[in-house]
């Protein structure tokens, strides 16, 4: 019964994909970074307002800090502070091979040293004029594809509100 199948309209699909990519990000429960790490246990994600070209989601603060240090407009002392604050993550945060394109990385709030270093890096990014926001997640926002003592990689459920 193949004669009932509709042919794929590739031009329409491309146009629809392009229009979706140009739409603004949906309103989600992001909040301004508080002065201290959260006291409740859970998961948090820090991101900038910049949209990532690869995923279409907001760029995470660690990823964006690499781009920021390459900026020619950045003051040298701020660049040095960013690099120094990021070194802890390079040395102590495991960099696993997670082959899941849709995975979003969250930090565990119970990892106090990691949270303190995140706040230090956020301070330097704010010094550079970059707004960093936090999304706190409760419950099971998706399928966990990696977890260690500091972080969790999650592929979000469609209805979880995690972007």
Image: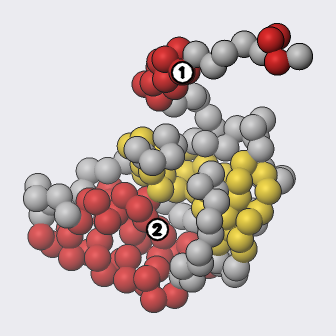
Helix, strand or loop at mark 2:
helix
Question: Badge 2 is on which residue?
Answer: 119
Q: CA distance from mark 2 to mark 1?
A: 46 Å
As drawn, 69 above or below 60:
below
Percent x, y of residue 161: 70, 38
Percent x, y of residue 52: 42, 46
Q: Quadrant of the C terminus?
A: top right
Residue 106 showing in the rendered view: no
The structure residue drawn at horizontal position 37% and vertical position 47%, both measured from the top left corner, is 131
Count of all numbered marks drawn on residues in the image: 2
Q: Nearer the viewer, residue 42 or 7?
A: 7
As drawn, 70 above or below 142:
below
Q: Nearer the viewer, residue 5 or 142?
A: 5
As drawn, 156 above or below 38:
above
Q: Quadrant of residue 95?
A: bottom right
84 sits to left or right of 27: left
Helix, strand or loop at mark 1:
helix
Q: Nearer the viewer, residue 62 or 53?
A: 53
Residue 151 showing in the rendered view: yes
112 sits to left or right of 91: right
Q: Which mark is residue 10?
A: 1
The structure residue drawn at horizontal position 62% and vertical position 69%, both measured from the top left corner, is 98
């Amino acid at each position: 019964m193949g004669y009932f199948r509709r042919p794929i309209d590739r031009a329409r699909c491309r146009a629809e994909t392009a229009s979706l990519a140009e739409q603004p990000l949906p309103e989600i429960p992001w909040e301004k970074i508080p002065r201290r790490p959260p006291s409740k246990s859970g998961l948090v994600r820090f991101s900038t307002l910049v949209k990532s070209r690869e995923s279409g989601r907001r760029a995470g603060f660690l990823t964006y800090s690499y781009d920021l240090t390459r900026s020619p407009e950045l003051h040298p002392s701020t660049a040095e502070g960013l690099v120094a604050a990021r070194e802890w993550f390079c040395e102590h945060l495991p960099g696993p091979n997670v082959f899941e394109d849709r995975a979003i990385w969250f930090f565990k709030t119970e990892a106090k040293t990691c949270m303190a270093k995140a706040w230090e890096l956020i301070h330097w990014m704010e010094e550079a004029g970059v707004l960093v926001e936090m999304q706190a997640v409760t419950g099971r926002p998706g399928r966990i594809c990696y977890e260690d003592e500091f972080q969790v990689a999650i592929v979000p459920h469609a209805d979880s509100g995690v972007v």
